[in-house]
Amino acid sequence: MKNKKIKAAIVGGSGFTGLELIKILSFHKYAEIKFVTSRTYKNLRVSEVFPSYSDYGSSELIFSEDIGKEELETIDVLFLCLPPLKSMQYLKEKITGYKGMLIDIGSDFRINDPENYKIWYKTKHLLAEVLPEFVYGLTEIHRDKIKKSRYIANPGCYPTSVLLGVAPILKNKSVKVSSIIIDSKSGITGAGRKLKQEYLFCSLNDNFYAYSPVMHRHIGEMEQEIEKMYGEKINVCFTPHLLPVDRGIFTSIYCKLELQAKDYNLAESFHKIYKQMYKDSCFVKFLGEKIPQLKDVAGTNMCHIGLSWDSRTHTLKIFTAIDNLLKGAAGQAVQNMNIMMGFSEAEGLAKNGIFS
Amino acid sequence: MKNKKIKAAIVGGSGFTGLELIKILSFHKYAEIKFVTSRTYKNLRVSEVFPSYSDYGSSELIFSEDIGKEELETIDVLFLCLPPLKSMQYLKEKITGYKGMLIDIGSDFRINDPENYKIWYKTKHLLAEVLPEFVYGLTEIHRDKIKKSRYIANPGCYPTSVLLGVAPILKNKSVKVSSIIIDSKSGITGAGRKLKQEYLFCSLNDNFYAYSPVMHRHIGEMEQEIEKMYGEKINVCFTPHLLPVDRGIFTSIYCKLELQAKDYNLAESFHKIYKQMYKDSCFVKFLGEKIPQLKDVAGTNMCHIGLSWDSRTHTLKIFTAIDNLLKGAAGQAVQNMNIMMGFSEAEGLAKNGIFS
Amino acid sequence: MKNKKIKAAIVGGSGFTGLELIKILSFHKYAEIKFVTSRTYKNLRVSEVFPSYSDYGSSELIFSEDIGKEELETIDVLFLCLPPLKSMQYLKEKITGYKGMLIDIGSDFRINDPENYKIWYKTKHLLAEVLPEFVYGLTEIHRDKIKKSRYIANPGCYPTSVLLGVAPILKNKSVKVSSIIIDSKSGITGAGRKLKQEYLFCSLNDNFYAYSPVMHRHIGEMEQEIEKMYGEKINVCFTPHLLPVDRGIFTSIYCKLELQAKDYNLAESFHKIYKQMYKDSCFVKFLGEKIPQLKDVAGTNMCHIGLSWDSRTHTLKIFTAIDNLLKGAAGQAVQNMNIMMGFSEAEGLAKNGIFS
Amino acid sequence: MKNKKIKAAIVGGSGFTGLELIKILSFHKYAEIKFVTSRTYKNLRVSEVFPSYSDYGSSELIFSEDIGKEELETIDVLFLCLPPLKSMQYLKEKITGYKGMLIDIGSDFRINDPENYKIWYKTKHLLAEVLPEFVYGLTEIHRDKIKKSRYIANPGCYPTSVLLGVAPILKNKSVKVSSIIIDSKSGITGAGRKLKQEYLFCSLNDNFYAYSPVMHRHIGEMEQEIEKMYGEKINVCFTPHLLPVDRGIFTSIYCKLELQAKDYNLAESFHKIYKQMYKDSCFVKFLGEKIPQLKDVAGTNMCHIGLSWDSRTHTLKIFTAIDNLLKGAAGQAVQNMNIMMGFSEAEGLAKNGIFS
């Protein structure tokens, strides 16, 4: 089996997500990286540019500027780690003739409806005709569809942290939700490696603040998927914040529920619903009334979920923690690849957290 | 004037709040510290125990174990920086005969109604008869009452960050508020100097999480004051979180408003309301649609407030930032003292932020 | 082969080093953890106490209070992660009859000579008769002896960072060293999980300072090993400092060399010496004139080394970076186990860094 | 007196040092800022660009692009906060006719000898003829000269932390020093607000490393001043490191001393020398054998100094801590201004530390 590893290529390999993907795939039993592109670092060894990546005796991995048409045809799975709009530009040029699988970690193919896409991204979609072939890759929710799909739109980091948290309650037909308010806090890697004064150490150390308080683009995917789960459209109120840590998203979700006065043992029944939903998902851990901590998930593909019921305001508080670069990006991408390829879902992803 | 400085005493001077108070008063033009108590450090110089405090040539300040009855009678203003329950125990013993002013930075006298106190603190109040003499010291809201009062219950750090944020909208009679959800994030000094594994550097660095998700005691004061402002009781849904920074509270408040479809220029009218309310308050800065940052208020007595209107969910997002040890504790205490004594409100408190 | 995994036991499994060892061994192909002890957490699941450790479907690992005599006899390799003096107390009781291998990550068996031990640890050694059976487990230097030994004294974290840095220059007979000054900076995990005010987040965040400026116990092992390398005793001047990070030791070593005026191409020849010495060591990476960074080694078993020649003062500056919990403790322990057992040296240890 | 405040101007007011200077002078009793320049932020209010600066009701401070010739003539003291080479370019144009005092916080006038300047700055000095008029503004050492001078070259941050540490021992004629090795660790504000990938939060958080290991320009000033103190040239071996904190420099200095075997009570006599030298300096605090901590000096103009004698290697370890933006830059500049103007040396600078 080992001598029949699938061939992977990564486009945009020098961002945080790209590097994380390289690190995962370099230890994957059944996959090997054939190409990884970076314009900035073309022809340089990955381990030289990023010394935290070690070759460990394997053949040297070198950034290339691009992947040629013929080279692309030898690839089994193509990962795109590109900024908004860039994935569809890339694919418009390259997709014809490409026979392999495709996992777009960017945001261009997450919104199913091109009209809706226009609302959130303020531009016309360039590949509307291909959109229907993409499955939204929130693994635990769309596992069956992912298994049969060729193209995956990997979810955004915030939507992953939100949707895994609300799915059990929204899919449960007996609960009526009257509003959802989401307060997310993300580590700085979520902003990428952009050279802006606001991302300097001295700007962020000991600091904290909210940003994009209206119409953050991730709301589009959240509402799309919430509608699929709940059967009705719910407008969510979402605010992202920047945490002075490298990695991790902690999301606090406030779901106001419409319940009858008699629903006394509610808390317990919530626990049942959550346990039931994730019983076969090795990367979701339901903590009951315990509250997740960023430290416990950093460096892992896990999503930890905890619940708290505020009976005075009829609000279910859902707390989730993920590593934004793993379950929120590269980790979930490989999880999806594993499912598409028929590998064990956790292959290459079973790791303990980095903190103690 | 200078040779007629008022005499201050601090009970519980070795916690974060106590030390902050020492630092402020040591540069106050019209006050001097006569006593500062600490059982742990009795007879030691403050500058030896806390080298970040400098004597700068002034007479040496030394921790004493306690303040005698006669000594207390020479005091003009007494600050209590004690844990829950300890302030009322202390006062029960000492208050008879004490003629000076009193500012309790602890939590024992914030709830006006002893029955309500029992709900939030799970114990009977020991000095219910004195409760009516205390004014809730949220300076910008109760300035007039503070001026005439002798006893101040200094607000909690979270309530300060919340109440200054919601006051303008709640006091405005034309707006109807249907729910208030509050997501607060506090620096670690908020937890005091407790020796617990969860407060070790390695437990908190790179970490983030929510705590006390139900029935945090500060909800009691928030709802009491909200009722005074709004005229009606509102149950608030409040969740505190721990940030990996030393100082500061950033609070995100989600107020769902009931508004008519025609209220188009709403955002603008909110701005007017906020500007109007705080136009004479030198320690509240309204930023309009800009979002406050912890770094800008750390080391100051300021409260920065920013607004964002989410028309899709009819939610007014209110963001506030304070330094939990200053506007959230020792700073506001001195601000109240200044008002009670007839000094300039900003005396000893006008400082630039520590970060750049 | 897989169904013939060796059986490991860990005594003192709830400290930082113990937990790290658990995490490594839980993914080791040829080893499995049979026992892990912790008095504090006895009978609790490891993954419950430390949620950053995931069971990933394997049989549950549970802390036990102790390991019985008969149980111990079933063990192939015993790891001790105990504070000073505790390892020898433990072994004094248990070692008779134990047939397996032993790796002591504590400090009791690192000093070969019991008289010298007394100088540095201010107490008589309890098992002087067993001392000669221990090999000092600095893998890259004593690989051959380790291969044939049964008992390993795993080096201290500081000595590892120092000795790997100086070994090439000291073992080279043509260079005369006139003094060695060492300035080390360690992350806080080096201090363990002790509940002291000085290890609280608020005491260490934004802080930095030196500690134990005279007679730090690690000097004993450094000088012992330096004498073995250099053939002569050199008294080193060593100062440890505390860095506000979780993991990692960065060491700056200043070696004053006695050289002839003609030695022009010195820098280059140093590079050759270093490359040569570590050419077969997969966990040491020589960077030439590049300076190592903590971030690149955190989460790995690597030691990165960089050099700089200050011709004005005839000083060779050697910079090394390791992860104190891995190459400085649990990682090197497993590396030694691999060598003793005949496994591939990197088994279970080949990992990319956690930072980007 | 207050209505006769001296008029100050700041050129380069938007860097870390410039902002710090603004903050100090805005609370100075006897000085007021007339102009502060910034090309980037011209015509913007300082408090808008840097919300951590508060106007507190004073007249608004606005960045101007430049200061006109006539405007300059109204100024009593001019502060330059400019990068290397820029101060002398600025002065070459403007100095003719300027009658006031000048404090250059940049590096152009620190090296007295233009030939020596060329060695360290690799370029010809543009104003060699004015160099002799500058006094090196290390206040505690050159206080008398400063008092009588018109032009000050404010010392670099590293040299300040080094020279205050070694001055007492070097000026003492009875001690012979055979080598000086200096290991400095600086907070990130030392690097200014440069937009480089290496200064991003994600590059520095949890990281630590040395930089510029050979020929750092600050060595030039150190050796110049050491020669003045010691009477002989000593080549120092200096290495700066970057700490993941905003502010502060911690310097560990290793002085190898040539001493007679009989010098037993050496440690004590060192203490006397240090106490004696700084007994009238309110901004230097000698801690004896206690080790300084960054937290205690951050936000202050203090230099804390501690000693440790390593008799095994005849090395005096000197540890110093300063705030690089205050005693290492803007604070010392104002201290010098105070002395030049005949104000109290501590005016505007007596502040407690920001940390607890």
Image: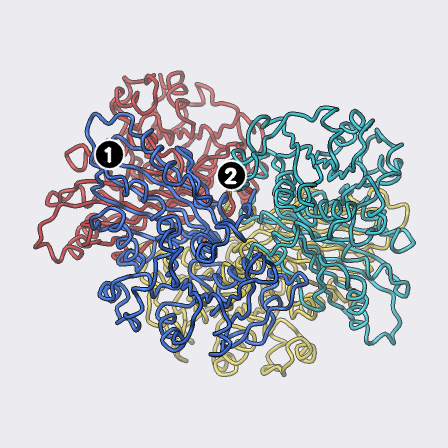
Chain colours: A yellow, B cyan, C red, D blue
Q: Is residue A342 left or right of residue D252?
A: right
Structural crowding at the residue carrying mark 1, measured as other residues with C-alpha within 10 Å and reported as few (<14), some (14–19) or many (≥20): some
| Residue B324: image tag | none
Taking depth in this image into account, of A350 and C10 the one nearest to the observer is C10
Q: Is residue B178 left or right of residue B207?
A: right
Q: On the image, which quarter does residue C185 sit in?
A: top left
Depth-wise, is mark 1 or mark 2 nearer the camera? 2
Q: In the rendered image, which quarter contains the N terminus of chain C? A: top left
Under tag 1, what secondary structure? loop
The chain carrying label 1 is D
Structural crowding at the residue carrying mark 2, measured as other residues with C-alpha within 10 Å and reported as few (<14), some (14–19) or many (≥20): many
Cα distance between the residues tagged 1 and 2: 31 Å
Q: Please state the horizontal and vertical placement of residue A178, each as a whole percent of the image.
A: 82, 60
Taking depth in this image into account, of C349 and B128 the one nearest to the observer is B128
Under tag 2, what secondary structure? loop
Q: Return the residue at label 2.
A: B51
For residue A219, say whether it is visible.
yes
Name which residue type carries label 1.
Answer: Thr
Q: Residue at x 43, y 65 (%)?
A: D101
Q: Is residue C67 left or right of residue C119?
A: right
Name which residue type carries label 2.
Answer: Pro
Taking depth in this image into account, of C140 and C310 the one nearest to the observer is C310
The chain carrying label 2 is B
Query: Quick check: marks 1 and 2 in contact, CB under 8 Å?
Result: no
| Residue D313: image tag | 1
Taking depth in this image into account, of A272 and B111 the one nearest to the observer is B111
In this view, D230 is above or below A242: above
For residue A339, say whether it is visible.
no
Q: Please state the horizontal and vertical placement of residue A92, each as a whole percent of the image.
A: 52, 82
Q: On the image, which quarter does residue B114 sit in?
A: top right
In this view, B79 is above or below B168: above
Q: Residue at x 13, y 42 (%)?
A: C176
